[in-house]
Amino acid sequence: MFHVLIEFAMWCGALKPERNPIDLVVVRGASKRIRAPRSLTVVQFKALCAQLKEPFKTMAMVSVCFGLRISECLALRWSDVD
């Protein structure tokens, strides 16, 4: 309880913050995942690739091989390829 009281005192300015002020911001439920992440097995990924057409098949292979997120994969340009 004392910890919460000190946190509130720093938040409202009664005490000088002893750390980064953004640490005092709390957004309830913002970091909780709505559903658990799902991973494909090798067999499932091969079945998926068999159904994909180009350029999506290549995008899937590049993403899996390099561990890219979809936003990172979509941001790639030919100039990024050595």
Image: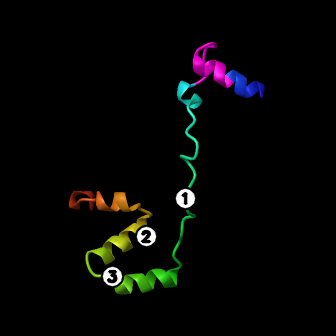
Numbered label attached to residue 64: 2
Numbered label attached to residue 34: 1
Residue type at numbered disc 2: Val
Q: Nearer the viewer, mark 3 or mark 1?
A: 1
Where residue 12 sits, quadrant-wise, is: top right
Q: Which residue is mark 3?
A: 52
Residue type at numbered disc 3: Leu
Residue 28 horizontal side relative to residue 82, left or right: right
Work out whether 45 lies above or below 8: below
At mark 3, the secondary structure is loop
Magenta stretch? 7-19
Where residue 37 sits, quadrant-wise, is: bottom right
Disc 3 packing (10 Å; few <14; some 14–19; many ≥20): few
User: x and y percent of residue 1 in the render?
Assistant: 77, 28
Work out whether 15 lies above or below 58: above
Earlier sequence position, callout 2 versus callout 3: 3
Numbered label attached to residue 10: none
Earlier sequence position, callout 3 versus callout 1: 1
Whether residue 63 is visible here, answered yes or no, is: yes
Q: CA distance from mark 2 to mark 3?
A: 14 Å
Q: CA distance from mark 3 to mark 1?
A: 28 Å
